[in-house]
Image: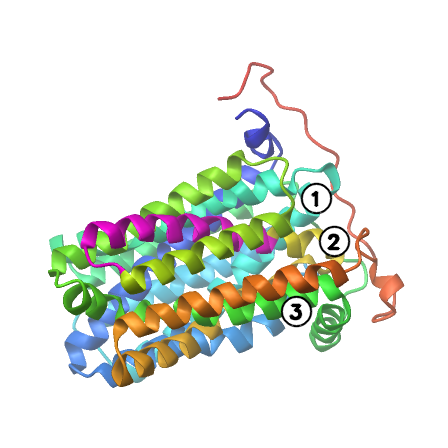
Amino acid sequence: MGGRLEPLSRRPFGRLLGSYTINELGDSVGVIALALLVYEETGKALATGALFIAAKFIPAFLAPGLTARLDQLDFRRTLGALYFAEAVVFGLLAFIADGRYVLVVVLVLALVDGTLAVTARALTRGAVGTLLQPIGLLKEANGLLNVGFASASVGGAALAGLLISQWSVSLALAGDAVSFLVVALVLARTRGLPPTQVEPQRWRERFQGGLAFARSDPVVRMLLVGEGLALIFFTLVIPIEVIYARDSLDSTSAGFGLLVAAWGAGIVLGSLLYLGVKRRSAATLIIGSTAAIGVAYCGMSVATTLTAACLLAVLGGTGNGIQWIAVVTGLQEATPVDLQARVVGLLESLNAAIPGVGFLIGAAIATLASPRTAYAVAGIGVLVLVLLALIFRRFVPDGSPPSIEQTGLLAPEPTRRAPEPVAPVDASPRP
């Protein structure tokens, strides 16, 4: 594992990894806490739906523009400011949750935080690509980021439940505020992050340049479109999982929890497996892991016992843990350094917006037919996408990613130079 942990010896990757993990952990805790707050105060599913639209869907359209504006500035100040702003937002939410609830204010603050969170993830990915792609450690760095993301995503729900059950929603939100404040202070003192560009451009020009590159490059275009379609099928079953566990499998609420935990365990396992894989291309990993998710969904559509469904959920979760990070890595490998944050930001926005489409389709299928039918549709849809990927893969040209100047999409921009690799202070073997 020594080579897999090599990025940790390259400053400031460790701090970027920590901030990225805490961002996802805070996002998971915050969404659950706010969902409970809104539902308890209103008792209406419509209000909870409005929260998810404000926190997830609308930010998907706002974050790319903000990313294009900020990724040309000093990353240390920019990331520090983003996390400080998130700390302020969660502090206000904690204050409101303590007996001062106003739905409109909660929705506005959730929208602001959602936009900041997506932007921070995109900028972090961009900084990692800028620093580590030139020295051949991008795949290893993404593997570590994925382990942190998966662990935070799975653990965030459990942490939210613990904090809320033992104390209150307000305390859970206040804890988020403190964690983001600590990250902001740490990043503000971090050296070695990409500096400000010499001649900053208008955000609109930068956004259009990133979008134009994504449209023109066949690899990037295929990854973005393919992942957007895949996300519809991946998320199609999420709103009906509880119905599937209770009715289709004739299980209990505890069984539903076990099913969700099995998928989460698979995500962590897949993240660790990706970290250990060295000699597989991003395309091979994407196709194989996507197929695993499709097979799992198809199997769950006909599973008759909770045990069988949980085993299939582990398989699907493992594919899930590999698939996302393989797509991110493939996208970054095909993108020039100066466009990293903007192009990855488009992917992060798809990941925030598309699930809403999947939720609606899944709920409609389960209502008109059954939860098993929804799983079957999801599984077959995923496998069809895998078949299409195998067909069209041979039409994608190989070669190194073009520079911005070669694409002709923008006037030449000053290129950030990655800092020279910093040798580890301690020469003893790393764990």
Find residue 337 and name its label.
2
Q: What residue did someone put label 1 on?
A: 133
- Residue beneath the point at 62% across and 47% down: 128
**Label 3 is placed on what type of residue?**
Arg
Q: Which residue is mark 3?
A: 69
Quadrant of residue 207 within the rendered picture? bottom right
Residue plotted at (60% across, 15% down): 427
Task: Between residue 116 and residue 31, name the one nearer to us.
Answer: 31
What colour scheme governs how the chains and residues are painted in the rendered image of this protein? rainbow
Q: Point out the residue furthest to the top here.
A: 428
Q: Is residue 358 left or right of residue 121?
A: left
**Relative height, residue 237 to residue 6 (above, below):** below
Q: Amino acid at mark 2?
A: Val
Q: CA distance from mark 2 to mark 1?
A: 8 Å
Given residues 414 and 220, the one toward you in this image is 220
Give the residues drawn in magenta, as a range. Answer: 303-328
